[in-house]
Image (cartoon, coloured by chain):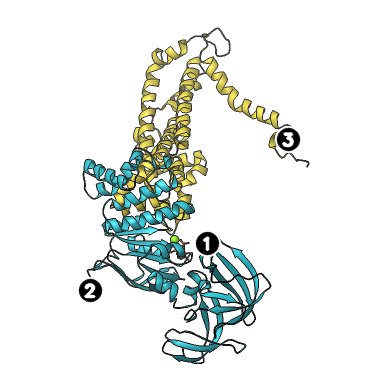
Amino acid sequence: MAHVNENIKSYRGFRSITLLCLVVLYAPLVIVTIYSFNASQSITNWEGISLRWYADVFTGPESEKFKVAAFNSFTIAIIAATASTAIATLAATAMVRGGNFKLRTVSFGLISLPLMVPEIVTAVATLIFFNAIGFTRGYMTILVAHIAFCIPFAYLPISARMQGIEDSFEQAAMDLYATRRQAFTRILMPLMAPGIISGFLLAFIVSLDDFIITNFVKGAGVETLPTAIFGSVKQGIKPNIMAISTMLLSISIVMVTISYFVSKSDNTK
Amino acid sequence: MPGNKTDAIDVRNAVKRYGDFTALKRISLTIKDNEFFTLLGPSGCGKTTLLRMIAGFEDVTEGEILLYGDEIESLPPHLRPVNTVFQNYALFPHMTILDNVAFGLEMRGKTKAAARKRAGEMLELVQLSQFAARKPSQLSGGQQQRVALARALAPQPKVLLLDEPLSALDLKLRKAMQLELKHLQRETGITFIFVTHDQEEALTMSDRIAVMSAGKMQQLGSPTEIYERPRNMFVADFIGETNLLEVSVDEVRNGRAVCHLGGGHALTCNSVEGIGEGAKVHMSVRPERLFMSDVPVEAESLKGRVAENIFVGTDISTLVDLAEGPQFIVRTSNSDRGNKRIFEPGSEIFVNMELGAGRLLMD
Ligand SMILES: Nc1ncnc2c1ncn2[C@@H]1O[C@H](COP(=O)(O)OP(=O)(O)OP(=O)(O)O)[C@@H](O)[C@H]1O
Ligand SMILES: [Mg+2]
């Protein structure tokens, strides 16, 4: 019998389009990474491998600025990820376990809408909001904004995980004399752990990498790594920017990889 | 009205509604202390719903549930001294077998060490001690089933609820577990409420059976009562195999009824309360209480022609097309072959009822 090959690989041009996409997506990253190891002052001439620009990030003329920015970025990312993960966990519990309450669809929409809204709109809106309530811009405004926009990112892996956990486990726990709270901490939380960790890492990365919103709500003089990098780039791209970008990229890759493997590990089976 | 302290569970006029769908329509039943009680009925009749109401996972729309005389219908599950063996076992996947069994004891305030010690003894009881350190996913279905049982029994509940606990097991294992369950129930003295839609399982295991259909109680009684004296069409049809004949009642006296078939052939059989003269009802007769002959031997002999013989291991089922009625099944046990005859398909024969075998049924 003749077999019609429906495999997408057999379409003409499939291979070249795939390659083109990959090149457009990854060539800049690869080039930045390679040139961050360049010994040359120039960002285009290759003069051999060196770690001088990495040393420059930590000890060079701009190192003070980067250190403060890195401190801000990491503390904000950790606090924002923790807070948004906690909120997202409670929201997911209510949404998935709360029965069929009215406005459930609306609630889900409200939680995930920020993912669809253009970031610039959120940024402007947040800025207007802070102005309206008279919140002086600075570290705190960045933190609050980050907690808010990280929630949907933390929410998605957590609720996906939770939907995969049958409620019979909690019922069995309560049947065995556990209070609602004990059933949550002893049974549901451990089973949700992969989703929670994955949500935390995602929120962390999103917060660490955010530029647009941060740039709007930060006060004068308060910088995070992305805004500090942007500030430097405005005065011309130096190789130390490539080094710092490569470091940020590696952190992101590590986090996303961990998040992927954690969310794939399944302790409900 | 205060409850009886010696009755394990007393369900009074329980109604359960989901929106405008009524899943349970005024169920009342009393389950005695130390009883192996079975809820039997086809899929969707409300068995799980009733069980979940006793466990506390569903609230009661109307009515009361008493446990040893105390009203429990408004208590949350963790305050009811009742444990459940879930249909899918619901073993905690992130805990070892030992910790699973110890969980209920710990929640009841035992120290971790004491809980584990007792959990170990429970695992011994179900012969799974060597698996104590494993996770549930590393056990077979039958083993998981026994862990679920040990976990539910460990805190010594007053009543154990079992929702079709054997349905996921293969036939052989199921038979073995039926015996084991029965043993455990005797040994522990705990009241068991067992849910199944398998009538054979219900008949073998239970002290008493409640037959349900469409949210209503159809009959409550011992296995023998339910099998030999079904109250209505539904019970007769659902429990075991039965032959049904449409008859008109001519006379009822002393629990016996004289009636006739459509063609006028007269029959005598057992009646039930509530059936009077002139009623058009069904008569049921179990296949094993029929025998065949080439000449009529009883007043109740019905003429027919053999359609098929089906060999089913321990006995032979013969399908007979009655001259004056539907197809009948006649069951002849292989051990009875000495004094009961089997006829070839196509033979013109008579189907005879043993004395008192026929029973009238309410619709
Ligand atoms: N949460 C619910 N909402 C609406 N209807 C429900 C709900 N739970 C159960 N029902 C309905 O109530 C009826 C009884 O359900 P139940 O689960 O008690 O049946 P069952 O006798 O246990 O059946 P099975 O043998 O298939 O397990 C069914 O018709 C079912 O559709
Ligand atoms: Mg059920």
Residue A154: image quadrant is top left
Can residue B296 be seen by looking at this rendering?
yes
What amino acid does circle 3 point to? Tyr
Give the residue displayed 50% in from the left and 39% down from the top: A119
Check whether the beta carbons of the residues at disc 1 and disc 2 lie within 8 A of each other.
no
Instruction: Choose between A228 and B283: the one closer to the eye.
Output: B283
Subunit bearing disc 2: B
Subunit bearing disc 3: A
What amino acid does circle 1 point to? Thr
The residue labelled by disc 1 is B314
Give the residue displayed 45% in from the left and 51% down from the top: B173
Element at badge 1?
loop
Q: Outermost residue, front direction?
A: B338
Instruction: Choose between B71 and B191: the one closer to the eye.
Output: B191
In the image, residue A67 above or below residue A142: above
Q: Quadrant of ligand 1?
A: bottom left
Q: CA distance from mark 1 to mark 2?
A: 51 Å
Residue A259 lies, in percent from the top left, at 45, 33
Badge 1 or badge 2: first in the primary sequence: 2
Give the residue displayed 44% in from the left and 78% down from the top: B231
Can residue B25 be seen by looking at this rendering?
no
Q: Nearer the viewer, mark 3 or mark 1?
A: 1
The cyan-coloured chain is labelled: B
The residue labelled by disc 3 is A11
Residue A222 lies, in percent from the top left, at 37, 28
Subunit bearing disc 1: B
The yellow-coloured chain is labelled: A
The quarter of the rendered structure image containing the N terminus of chain B is bottom left
